[in-house]
Image (cartoon, helix red, strand yellow):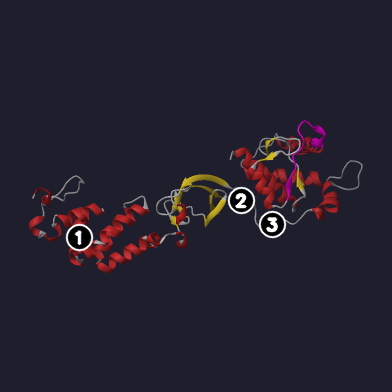
């Protein structure tokens, strides 16, 4: 959505908040920020403005195109405000937006309380007497503009919200389906063919997975419980040096899922080669300051964990993924 449309919608809401109520109808001009397509009988309102009207339980009735009489009152009011406010501000200097707004509010209040020509009452008094009681109460929450994006559901049952670079779960039946994300400042909704299939509180942290366990197939349930704390606690239960190595793995990854998969692979070596060999492999890897699953795998495959440390001070660790190890040539 363009900034111009967003500013227009915000201005309409601010007006209702200023008057302290919701009118039966809002009558905008046929500007592009409000009306996508003009029509004498059924104009097309922009989607965000329509959402605003639904939130405030009102309706949008655009002025008829090429009918000046439909908007004469508004244009007259604009001219009056120009003379009552802008003229008094144009030669003044303001050093920030707050100062300018404060000056506008003061002049606007004077304008509203000034007695109408030939009348014993002001615009403000007329509003209180004839109009205020006809306004409906405002909803407690302000309207939040909805933005949208599209994504394809990944194999792990999550969709990428590209704006924040984080992930949200959807029911596993929609894996590989293309979905639409509608999001506000606080909520992310996921739609498939106009049906909402998931809703989450929005997270502003990059590379974080927000997961509803009910969305995931049984094969994904274990993944849903992955976290840095879980892997660190698991590693420390084996040995502090294993915990230290897992922390290094997590700290040296930009993407949490990559780190978690590496952690899982490393810790699974406990069952494959035994606790003692895994501990020795982590100690040696910490000495080399090379933090990856491949490091531990190379150490174990080449039995570097069992070499005497004093006799192996000059031993180089095969760290490149193309190095096959001595067993390849046997």
Q: Give the label on residue 215, or none.
A: none
Give yes or no for residue 304 being in the magenta stretch: no
Q: Which residue is label 1 attached to?
A: 283
Which of the marked residues, 3 or 1, is nearer the chain's N terminus?
3
Q: Which residues are magenta?
A: 58-72
Q: What is the x, y in percent for residue 44?
A: 68, 39
Residue under the point 28% across and 69% down: 237
In the drawing, what numbered circle is on residue 139?
3
64 in the magenta segment: yes
- Above or below residue 188? Residue 47 is above
**Tag in front: 3 or 1:** 3
Residue 259 visible at all: yes
Residue 264 or 9: which is nearer the viewer?
Answer: 264
Q: Residue at label 2?
A: 144
Under tag 1, what secondary structure? helix
Residue furthest bottom in the image: 237
User: Image check: 108 left or right of 172?
Assistant: right
Image-based side of 145 in relation to 230, left or right: right
């Amino acid at each position: 959505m363009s900034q111009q449309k967003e500013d227009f919608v915000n201005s309409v809401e601010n007006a209702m908040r200023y008057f302290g109520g919701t009118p039966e109808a809002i009558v905008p001009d046929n500007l592009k920020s409000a009306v996508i397509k003009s029509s004498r009988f059924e104009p097309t309102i922009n989607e965000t403005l329509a959402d605003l009207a639904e939130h405030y339980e009102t309706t949008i009735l655009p002025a008829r195109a090429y009918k000046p009489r439909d908007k004469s009152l508004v244009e007259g009011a604009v001219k009056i405000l120009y003379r009552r406010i802008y003229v008094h501000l144009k030669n003044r200097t303001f050093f920030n937006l707050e100062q300018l707004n404060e000056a506008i509010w003061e002049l606007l209040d004077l304008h509203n309380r000034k007695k109408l020509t030939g009348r014993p009452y002001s615009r403000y008094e007329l509003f209180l007497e004839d109009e205020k009681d006809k306004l409906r109460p405002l909803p407690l929450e302000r309207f939040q503009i909805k933005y949208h994006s599209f994504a394809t559901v990944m194999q792990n049952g999550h969709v990428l919200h590209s704006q924040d670079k984080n992930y949200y779960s959807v029911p596993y039946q929609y894996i590989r389906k293309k979905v639409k994300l509608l999001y506000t400042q606080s909520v992310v909704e996921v739609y498939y063919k106009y049906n909402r299939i998931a809703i989450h509180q929005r997270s502003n942290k990059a590379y974080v997975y927000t997961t509803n366990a009910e969305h995931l197939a049984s094969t994904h349930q274990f993944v849903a419980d992955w976290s840095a704390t879980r892997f660190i606690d698991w590693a420390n239960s084996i040995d502090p040096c294993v915990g230290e190595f897992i922390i290094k793995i997590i700290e040296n990854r930009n993407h949490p899922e990559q780190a978690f998969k590496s952690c899982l692979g490393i810790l699974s070596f406990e069952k494959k080669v035994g606790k003692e060999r895994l501990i020795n492999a982590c100690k040696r890897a910490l000495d080399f300051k090379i933090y990856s699953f491949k490091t531990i795998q190379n150490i174990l495959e080449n039995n570097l964990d069992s070499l005497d440390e004093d006799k192996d001070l000059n031993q180089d660790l095969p760290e490149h993924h193309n190095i096959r190890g001595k067993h390849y040539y046997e």
